[in-house]
């Protein structure tokens, strides 16, 4: 019986036996490092949380609680996004895929599920004028963050070269988590709670930058970080496709297949594909691998990115609710629910490109304005054709107007993609050349 090749045997031992391994830090300069199956599973659970938040946003907008819904959504998206980013940062530096690391990761995923169950309570509380931070949501957040504290302390014990930074991260997460708990436990007025949550969020955002500049960088891998962020963006865009299916399904159930249903289905898919195309026009991985120092600003630009993409799905769900049930929403309100998040995604893509290339390329602005033009036209069409009353899908005119609005919103992403392929690419090359000519 032939013996197993020693190299294959070693690889199988690493991939199939997950006994405890030293957490001494990964190679920050390793090229071609890719996401692991565990990381992909972890990302999927978080995207489900984005989807749940988007569903709650759509539901509350349909009920007319727009302001409170946006506040609760912002709070939820920040909580989900920052927990994901924090662990992704750690995993890039110390993910050794041993049994203890796997269990800690799965426990955090359980916390995400608990947090998801707290989202309806958070949105209902916001609609009633109370704080969206509730015990169930905080319990889920605790389950998500406590394993991360333990992992940072384990890394501090096993990686003497980065011990101070690792302990610093553990302390930051612990103090911030204590603050989140106190905002629920203490009987504070809602304005005080909101201010406290904002202060805690800003402190958590600032702490990693200060820590790594003052104490030292932990061994995260810029290329790996770029891939993880792009994959979560990609999966979140899948929620736009799911929302398209829900919207069209509601319309078909109400009226059967029609030209409007086909236009909305095609527009939703074009919208998802266009936003995907636009996002991946940003040369993130090669630039971050060349200059890892840009990673901090680039990753912070993704905080609103994830929420805005999920909100596009929420806008399509608003349309689905308006189609499938009796609604008090006008066509203009539905158009706003669709156009505003799409505009935010386009603007954030432009801002992320500018941050990454450290470029204020004003020649890109006309293309940006041209991409936003169809969104403005969608709002004009909705205001003119929709009137002041609620959308009435039994009216063929309202159905056609809805299809035109969705089509114009999708056209915005198409203009962004076509414009970059024809013109914007040269802007990127020029910005890279100017960036390369600057002194280090």
Image: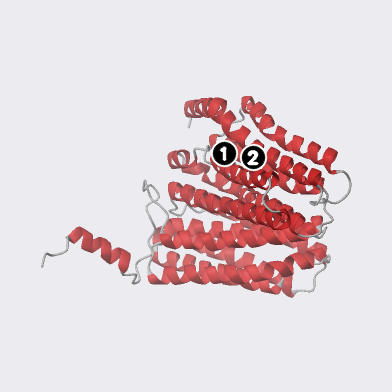
Instruction: Say which element carries label 1.
Output: helix
Quick one: quadrant of the N terminus?
A: bottom left
Of residues 439 and 413, the one nearer the viewer is: 413
Q: Is residue 334 left or right of residue 412?
A: right
Of residues 337 and 100, the one nearer the viewer is: 337
Q: Is residue 45 above or below residue 390?
A: below
- Compute the Cα span from label 2 to label 1: 8 Å
Residue at the (49%, 38%) spot, across then down = 283
| x, y percent for residue 198 | 72, 57
Query: Hey, which quadrant is residue 75 in on the image?
Result: bottom right
| x, y percent for residue 273 | 56, 43
Indicate which disc, 2 or 1, sits on the residue closer to the N terminus.
Answer: 1
Residue at the (56%, 61%) spot, across then down = 46
Query: Hey, which quadrant is residue 3 in on the image?
Result: bottom left
| x, y percent for residue 324 | 74, 58
Q: Tags 2 and 1 in contact by the CB under 8 Å rule? A: yes
Q: Residue furthest right?
A: 388
Of residues 38 and 152, the one nearer the viewer is: 38
Of residues 385 and 140, the one nearer the viewer is: 385
Q: Is residue 42 left or right of residue 383?
A: left
Please tell me how crowded label 1 is: few (under 14), some (14-19), or many (20+) other residues with Cα within 10 Å. Answer: many
Q: Is residue 132 visible?
A: no
Task: Determine which of the numbered discs, if any, sits on residue 346 in the image.
Answer: 2
Residue at the (50%, 27%) spot, across then down = 429
Q: Residue furthest left?
A: 1
| x, y percent for residue 237 | 58, 50
Please tell me how crowded label 2 is: few (under 14), some (14-19), or many (20+) other residues with Cα within 10 Å. Answer: many
Residue that numbered label 1 is attached to: 278
Residue at the (81%, 60%) spot, across then down = 63
Q: Is residue 273 visible?
A: yes
């Amino acid at each position: 019986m032939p013996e197993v090749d020693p190299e294959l045997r070693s690889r199988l031992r690493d991939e199939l036996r997950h006994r405890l391994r030293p957490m001494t830090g990964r190679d920050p300069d390793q090229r071609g490092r890719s996401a692991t199956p565990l990381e992909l599973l972890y990302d999927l659970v978080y995207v489900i949380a984005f989807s749940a938040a988007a569903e709650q946003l759509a539901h509350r907008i349909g009920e007319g609680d727009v302001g409170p819904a946006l506040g609760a959504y912002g709070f939820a998206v920040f909580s989900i996004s920052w927990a994901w980013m924090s662990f992704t940062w750690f995993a890039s530096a110390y993910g050794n895929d041993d049994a203890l690391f796997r269990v800690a990761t799965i426990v955090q995923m359980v916390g995400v599920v608990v947090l998801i169950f707290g989202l309806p309570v958070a949105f209902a509380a916001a609609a009633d004028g109370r704080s969206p931070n509730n015990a169930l949501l905080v319990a889920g957040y605790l389950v998500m963050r406590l394993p991360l504290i333990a992992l940072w302390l384990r890394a501090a014990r096993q990686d003497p070269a980065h011990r101070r930074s690792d302990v610093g991260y553990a302390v930051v997460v612990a103090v911030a988590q204590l603050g989140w708990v106190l905002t629920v436990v203490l009987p504070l007025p809602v304005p005080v709670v909101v201010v406290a949550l904002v202060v805690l969020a800003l402190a958590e955002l600032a702490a990693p930058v200060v820590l790594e500049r003052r104490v030292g960088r932990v061994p995260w891998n810029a290329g790996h970080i770029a891939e993880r962020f792009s994959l979560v963006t990609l999966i979140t865009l899948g929620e736009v496709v799911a929302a398209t299916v829900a919207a069209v399904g509601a319309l078909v159930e109400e009226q059967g297949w029609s030209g409007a249903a086909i236009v909305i289905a095609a527009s939703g898919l074009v919208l998802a594909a266009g936003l995907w195309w636009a996002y991946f026009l940003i040369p993130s991985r090669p630039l971050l691998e060349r200059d890892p120092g840009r990673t901090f600003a680039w990753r912070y630009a993704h905080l609103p990115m994830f929420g805005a993409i999920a909100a596009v799905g929420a806008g399509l769900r608003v349309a689905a609710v308006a189609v499938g049930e009796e609604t008090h929403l006008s066509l203009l309100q539905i158009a706003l629910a669709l156009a505003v998040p799409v505009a935010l995604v386009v603007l954030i893509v432009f801002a992320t490109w500018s941050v990454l290339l450290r470029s204020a390329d004003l020649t890109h602005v006309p293309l940006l304005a041209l991409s936003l033009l169809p969104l403005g036209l969608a709002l004009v069409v909705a205001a003119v054709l929709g009137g002041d009353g609620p959308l009435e899908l039994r009216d063929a005119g309202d159905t056609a107007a809805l299809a035109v609005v969705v089509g114009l919103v999708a056209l915005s992403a198409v203009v962004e993609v076509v414009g970059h392929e024809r013109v914007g690419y040269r802007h990127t090359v020029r910005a890279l050349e100017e960036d390369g000519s600057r002194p280090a």
